[in-house]
Amino acid sequence: MRVLLHGSELSAATAAAALAWVGHRVDWLLHESVPWSTLASADWLRREPSLMTQLEQAMASGNLTIIASPDASESPDIVWLALSPSQRSSASALLQHAMFDAYSGAVLVNNSTFPVGETERLHSLMGQQHSRVALPDTLEEGRAWLSFTRPVRWLLGCDDALGEQMTRELLRAFNRRSEVFQCMPCRAAELTKLAINGMLATRISYMNEIAGLADTLGVDVEHVRQGMGADTRIGFEYLYPGCGFGGPNFSRDLMRLADVQSASGRYSALLEQVMDINEQKKETLFRKLWGFFEGDLVGKTVAIWGAAFKPGTARIDHAPVLTLLEALWAQGVKVQLHDPAAIPALLAAVGQRSDLVVFEEDPYLACQGADALMLVTEWKAYWNPDWHRLATMLNEKLVLDGRNIYDPAFVSSCGLHYRGIGRRADPTML
């Protein structure tokens, strides 16, 4: 099929590479704000497993061509939109191009996170002689290539048979192991995507509230989590307390869902609470540090492991580390931070500072001379540190585990104070 793909998001890059890989002819119209020269050097793209290699191979094969104008794409069968919510005007401009008046039968595939009902509006600009489907972006950052080429599910919003047929053919190569399409009307698919992330965020925020209560009552929240997860009505997924979630898509989808609620005249106190709880939790490690040192933080040095909003990515969009850093710096704390991928993004966000020292290679360098260690992003390299070495490096022997990945009893047996999210232990062997 001939595909005209518009966008510079991760979803656009992944779709461009994957569709060209299976033989479609893809004309890739990048968003004007991110030309190829900028995108090709983006750290988040180069660190996404397999993706840059697949893009280069697709371009070398001739199946993927980067174009400067829609005029270079002749009568596409598929018009694939993968834009950010702020780029809706670009989608509108493209779909009003004169070429769509000259023929019929194209399918608009809206892979962008736009407001509910936007696929219908965009389709009206393109012309009723064409078809439309909503295919909400469900990629997982850090494994985008696998998410697209070996999907667990696709939410396929389709209101006519031709749109469904063409989309199934377009993605047939990725639908051979089992049926992965969940078909429903366009608006239902758009709302379902937002509702899923709203539910996941609600579970996380609820578990964080329970962790705070466990702290107050002197209960280890891990016992509570295990008990809740064992109930088949609840399960274990997204039931892990932590120091807040972030990310460009997850946070954006929550705000989009809140906007949809507001626009429909239905104020959502629940969503407001979920987002408020998450913002508060981004400071939870700071509050634990404050409590340990009884507010005397001026001149202290804190090591932080992890800046990315999740393991496997170089992005820090809405990441808890940003809120945490502001709180620490406001109290005169020096920060020594290690992250294997997100240092360029962090420095771009906060700039060079005398109270921030960054490391990309050895995480232990960040701990040298520090009073405490904060675990913020659970990169696998952090899961099994040399605790005895850390006990000799950390002046106050304090470990603040923002993801509850460590065993409190074992950490304390190595002579360290452990504070997690709803968990704690003090040294049992000094």
Image (cartoon, rainbow, N blue to C red):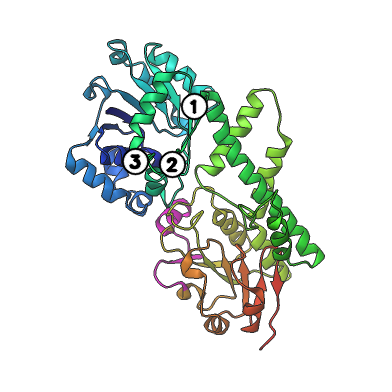
- Assess whether residue 26 is covered by the magenta stretch: no
Q: Quadrant of the C terminus?
A: bottom right
> In the rendered image, is residue 92 in sight?
no
Residue closest to the far right: 217
Residue occupying the point 41% across, 14% down: 125
In the picture, the quarter occupied by the N terminus is: top left
Decide which of 416, 225 is in the foreground and name it.
Answer: 225
* Number of the front mark, 1 or 2: 2
213 lies left or right of 284: right
Which three-letter amino acid code belongs to the residue tagged 3?
Answer: Ala
Asked if the magenta segment contains residue 358, the reply would be yes
32 or 50: which is nearer to us?
50
Please determine whether, in this image, residue 421 is positioned above or below residue 362. Answer: above
Of the image marks 3 and 1, the number of the one nearer the N terminus: 3
From the top left corner, tell me how far across and down residue 241 is, in percent. 65, 57
- Check residue 157 in the rendering and tell me which mark sits there, or answer none: 1
Residue 324, image x, y percentages: 59, 58
- Name the element at disc 2: loop
Element class at badge 1: strand
- Residue marked by disc 2: 178
Mark 3–mark 1 CB contact (< 8 Å): no
* Apparent side of residue 238 relative to residue 350 in the rendered image (left or right): right
Which residues are the magenta region? 343-363
Amino acid type at circle 2 is Ser
Residue 23 location in percent, x, y?
A: 24, 36
Residue that appears at 43% across and 19% down: 161
CA neighbours of label 1 inside 10 A, class few (<14), some (14 to 19), many (20+): many
Image check: 164 left or right of 369? left
Compared to residue 318, the image places residue 12 above or below, namely above
- Inter-mark Cα distance, 2 to 3: 25 Å
Depth check: give the residue in front, 138 or 234.
234
Residue 13 disc label: 3
